[in-house]
Image (cartoon, helix red, strand yellow):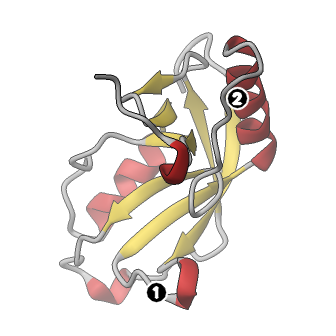
């Protein structure tokens, strides 16, 4: 774990369902404590003088472990459903201006990716997605 950073725990879920019950076949997410997202979305609202809100991510508060990557070793797919993993996270939120997240450190999740025959680190580094602007009410700066 990262020294001095908060620690939390999440539960592994394979091929999570999205809106419309559509399956994401080669995806794995780590479902995180919903209290983290509630806390950070509330802090965002307060920091914006109670004028802007974030909505939670589609899969609630989560860490994406495998993002549409077909594993080389399919025989170990779904080896750890429901297993808990501990991770540390940077408490300072990051954003691209639309999505908001916390950077995450979890060597066990890197090991899981290697066990599947994937690159150790994903293209987009591990992060805990906790919110984004509502697409219907988002205006880009001019």
Q: Nearer the viewer, residue 63 or 72?
A: 63
Among numbered discs 2 and 1, the one appearing first in the sequence:
1
- The CA distance from mark 2 to mark 1 is 28 Å
The correct choice, above or below, for 56 with respect to 70 in the image is: above
Q: Position of residue 26 (x, y in %)?
A: 34, 78
Q: Nearer the viewer, residue 32 or 40?
A: 40
The correct choice, above or below, for 109 with respect to 28 in the image is: above
Residue position for label 1: 23
User: Is residue 125 at all visible to an observer of this figure?
Assistant: yes
Identified at 44% across, 52% down, the residue is 109
Q: Position of residue 93 (x, y in %)?
A: 54, 22
Quadrant in which the N terminus appears: top right
Q: Which mark is residue 106?
A: none
Q: Nearer the viewer, residue 115 or 54?
A: 54
SS at circle 2: helix
Q: Position of residue 140 (x, y in %)?
A: 36, 32
């Amino acid at each position: 774990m990262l020294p001095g950073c908060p620690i939390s725990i999440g539960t592994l879920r394979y091929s999570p369902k999205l809106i419309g019950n559509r399956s994401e076949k080669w995806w794995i997410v780590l479902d995180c404590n919903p209290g983290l997202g509630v806390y950070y979305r509330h802090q965002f609202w307060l920091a914006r003088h109670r004028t802007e809100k974030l909505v939670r991510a589609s899969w609630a508060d989560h860490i994406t472990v495998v993002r549409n990557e077909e594993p080389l070793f399919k025989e170990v797919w779904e080896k750890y459903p429901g297993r808990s993993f501990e991770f540390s996270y940077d408490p300072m939120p990051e954003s691209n201006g639309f999505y908001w997240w916390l950077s995450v450190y979890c060597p066990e999740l890197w090991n899981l990716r290697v066990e599947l025959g994937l690159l150790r680190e994903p293209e987009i580094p591990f992060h805990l997605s906790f919110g984004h602007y509502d697409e219907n009410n988002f205006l880009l700066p001019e």
